[in-house]
Image (tube, rainbow, N blue to C red):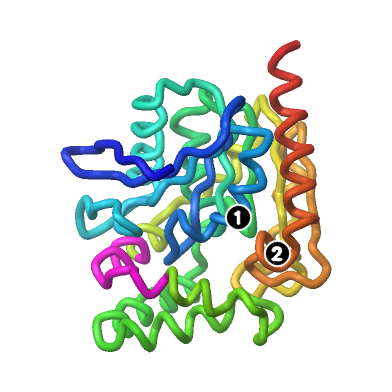
Amino acid sequence: MIRYASFRGGIVRYSDKGKGRAIVLLHGYPENLHIWDEFSDTLSKNFRVIGIDLPGFGETENFGYVHSMELMAQCVHSVMLQLNLRRYIVVGHSMGGYVAIAFAELFTENLRGLCMFHSTTYPDTEEKKADRDRGIVAVKKHPAQYLKAFSANLFADPNDTHIKKVQEIISTSTPRGIIAALEGMKVRPNREIILKFTRYPVLFIMGKKDKIINYQAALPQTEIPSQCEVLLLENAGHMGFYEAPEETLKALGKFAKRCFRERKR
C-alpha cells in the first residue's frame, strides 16, 4: 500500500506491506521504492516491510541542492516516527546503505539490525568524487543518456531480464534529485568506526561481479562488528535482489529472525 508522510514541510512517499516486526528497505541511486517490489512482496509474508522514496527520488520532494546522507537518514527516521515504529531492521542498497550507516550513527537506539546490501561504510575516493562531478555535468546535458549508461553497469549479465525494469524505474528520476544525491554522496564521511560500536547484528551482502562496489575492497570492514554475517554472491553484480533473489531472500529472512529473536532475550 502506497502512503505519504511529511518531512520538513514536504511530502515523502512510502510503501507499507505485511504485518509483524518491521524491516525498512532503502533503495539505491538513482532508484525509488519500486526497485524492491518483488523482494518486498515476498518478505511481507513474514514481516512488515516499509519502503521509502529517499529525498529527490520517486514522489518524495527535494529538500535542497545537496541531499546529504544525514538528511536522508533524518527523513527515514521522520517517517518511522510517524508510523510509531521504534525498533526495526534497516536494509540499505548501495546509496541506501550510505543512508543506513548514517542512520546507525544518528539513531542507533532504533536499530535491531543493519544490512549493507552492495554498499560500504567507506567514503568516496578522490577518483570517485571526480567521477560524480562528471556525472553531474552529464546529467545537466543529457539526463536520459546518463541514466541509460549508468544502468548498463549494474548487472553482471548485460542481458539480464531485469535491466529493462530498472531502466524504467530510474528513468523517472529528475536531474535535480540526481544531482542533489551525487553531491551528497560525494561529501559523506568515513563511517567505518560506527561498525565497531554496533550492539545489533550486521549483514553484508556483496556481489563478486559488482562493478560499482568492489567486494574485495569492501571485505575488511566486515571484520569490525562484533556480530557480523557476510553473504558473497558468486554470479551477482550490484543488484543481488534481482540476480540472486532466492539466496538473498533466504539470508535476509534468517538474519531478520535472528535480530528479532535476540531482542526478546
- Where is residue 178? Give x, y as percent: 33, 68
Q: Is residue 220 left or right of residue 109?
A: right
- Quadrant of the rendered structure where residue 172 is? bottom left
**Residue 263: in magenta span:** no
Q: Quadrant of the N terminus?
A: top left
Q: Earlier in the sequence, mark 2 or mark 1?
A: 1
Give 195 or 176, whichever is nearer the viewer. 176
Residue at 54% across, 51% down: 97
* Kind of element beneath mark 2: helix
Q: Residue furthest left?
A: 9
- Where is residue 15? Give x, y as percent: 44, 44
- Type of the residue with mark 2: Ala
How many labels were placed on the picture? 2
Where are the magenta residues, as a range?
A: 170-182
Residue behind mark 2? 217
- Quadrant of the rendered structure where residue 129 is? bottom left
Q: Is residue 75 left or right of residue 94?
A: left
What numbered label is drawn on residue 204?
none
Residue behind mark 1? 120
- Where is residue 113? Give x, y as percent: 64, 32
Cα distance in 3D space between marks 2 and 1: 9 Å
User: Crowding at label 1, few (<14), some or many (≥20) Cα neighbours within 10 Å?
Assistant: many
Residue at 66% across, 25% down: 199
- Type of the residue with mark 1: Thr
User: Crowding at label 2, few (<14), some or many (≥20) Cα neighbours within 10 Å?
Assistant: few
Most frequent secondary structure within the magenta stretch: helix
Residue at 47% across, 86% down: 149
* Kind of element beneath mark 1: loop
**Residue 174: in magenta span:** yes
- Quadrant of the rendered structure where residue 208 is? bottom right
Residue at 59% across, 40% down: 193
